[in-house]
Image (cartoon, rainbow, N blue to C red):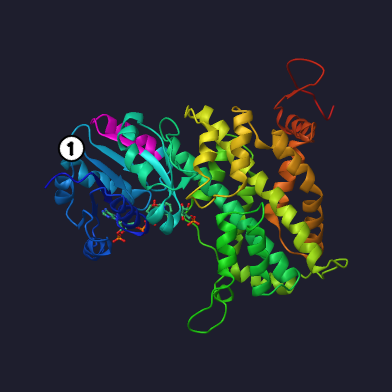
Amino acid sequence: MSNYEFGIVGLGVMGRNLLLNMADHHFSVVGLDLDAEKASTLEKEASSGHLIKGTTSPEEFVTLLKKPRAIMLLVPAGKPVDLVIESIMPLLEEGDIIVDGGNSFFTDTDRRVAELTEKNIHYFGMGISGGEKGARFGPSMMPGGHRESYERLRPIFEAVSAKVNGEPCVAYLGRGSAGNYVKMVHNGIEYAIMALISETYDLLHRGFGFKDDKLQEVFESWNNSDLQSFLMEITSEIFKKEDKTTGRRLINLISDVARAKGTGKWTAQNAMNIQVPVPSIDAAVTMRDISKYKMERMAASKALIWKDNTENVGETEIVSILKDAFYFAMLTVYAQGMSQLFVASKEYDYGLNLEEVVKIWRGGCIIRAACLDDFMHAYRRTPNSSNLLLDKQIASIMQKNQSAIRSTIKIAVDKGIPLAVFMSSLSYFDALRSETLPTNLIQAQRDYFGAHLYERIDMEGFFHTNWDE
Ligand SMILES: NC(=O)C1=CN([C@@H]2O[C@H](COP(=O)(O)OP(=O)(O)OC[C@H]3O[C@@H](n4cnc5c(N)ncnc54)[C@H](OP(=O)(O)O)[C@@H]3O)[C@@H](O)[C@H]2O)C=CC1
Ligand SMILES: O=C(CO)[C@H](O)[C@H](O)COP(=O)(O)O
């Protein structure tokens, strides 16, 4: 039978769950993986009556699919994507569609689009967020590229995506590699918010002696407020979890050396390439990197000493100001990511609709949060906004919470607890609201040592001065 509607290559965390999700929605689906066990368990996992098949044979996989074929790749980004394409290409026919659902680097997608378009294969990138549960029960999906191909597959994606107020968390985002680019920035925001939560944990735990139950309560109560978000919700769950072997809270048994697959670093690197400041994301990547220097940190913790000299700050007071500081910092993180998308859309001609981006992030994805509704309304008020912090309503929240972040940072400095992402967020805010910055001095220095010229505020043109004359 060759009438399966959709095929996925890669039956790992994402591929297996997305296929099961599609089967639940009565699509006939087939999965390909080199691992025979993954291919065979797929059929056992599906509910009875669903048309779902797993195979290790690329030939069988391709033969089973209805023409023109629709194939999604959910294999690790990089070389594996090229290897899969190479292996199935000889079996495909003109008009078939390949969707890369993984976290591919956006320029790789541009290259693959160019190579496959020549062979009349439609290729597009679609970022998917929501992890294992999202893929299984409703992710947020960020497609870009070949519009007609997306439209053909739209009913499947809309059916399996998360829904907010009945609306699917998937929408065509823009040309070329727009889908992968938006997912990359989504992950940069994810890194920074995770870092903000871990810095909060550090200040409360190391700085104020909060134990697991108390931390759990704080995160849970914040999740029941305007700080509601998926990351806050899972953090509160994490503090409850007991280790089965020792009976201790698992969080205290986990190594502090953080791993990363690289999407946060790509976001920061590309932001620098297109000259968009995203200091909170930069700091989040840096703090994961510093966590790797365990030996140096162990040595320095003994050699480089600071004695806590905090004035009396009570538990209720710190939780209250930290909550407002968190809200402030979280908004600057989203604002930075969205301003990167604003510039990237022009730079790469994506034609992004930023209201649509925040709208499909409201459900299913890792960075879903109550504040995305506010952003959606902000873009509705000003569709071409270059920075969310300029929106009147967002600005009023920033205004209300700025003294809290200043106080929080002072306390952390006095305690010697690193709040790199909070600090970067505040510096971003302070730089943004500075009509003049000290960069006139940098211009003078560049001209002094390298005759790089400078511009003046009172005359047109470029100037050079012999500074040591
Ligand atoms: N996990 C997550 O939360 C999320 C992941 N992503 C992205 O989705 C993509 C997939 O991630 P994930 O599912 O977690 O990864 P996994 O490693 O869990 O799964 C990848 C699967 O692809 C298989 N595979 C690799 N090469 C081939 C090949 N040539 N032919 C057939 N199958 C192959 C692997 O098989 P084997 O193990 O036998 O090599 C494995 O089963 C990645 O780009 C990831 O960054 C996106 C959002 C969330
Ligand atoms: O895309 C994701 C979620 O949106 C993945 O979980 C991502 O791979 C996590 O990134 P890292 O391993 O670098 O922390």
- The crowding category of the residue bearing disc 1, from other C-alpha atoms within 10 Å (few below 14, some 14 to 19, many at least 20), is some
Furthest residue to the top? 460
Q: Which quadrant of the figure contains the C terminus?
A: top right
The residue at the point 82 percent across, 55 percent down is 407
Note whether 125 is above or below 60 in the view shown. Answer: above
The residue at the point 80 percent across, 25 percent down is 466
In front here: 289 or 226?
A: 226
Q: Is residue 181 left or right of residue 343?
A: left
What is the x, y in percent for residue 287?
62, 58
Furthest residue to the bottom? 246
What is the x, y in percent for residue 195?
62, 57
Q: Is residue 207 left or right of residue 384?
A: right
In front here: 245 or 163?
A: 163
SS of the residue under disc 1: loop
What is the x, y in percent for residue 303?
74, 72
Note whether 235 is above or below 155 in the view shown. Answer: below
In front here: 159 or 241?
A: 159
> Would residue 11 be counted in the magenta stretch?
no
Q: Is residue 170 left or right of residue 52?
A: right
> Would residue 114 be counted in the magenta stretch?
yes
Residue 273 picture quarter: top right
Q: Disc 1, ligand 1: is the CB inside 8 Å?
A: no
The residue at the point 67 percent across, 55 percent down is 225
In front here: 150 or 298?
A: 150
Residue 214 picture quarter: bottom right
Note whether 267 is above or below 208 in the view shown. Answer: above
Q: Which residues are magenta?
A: 108-124
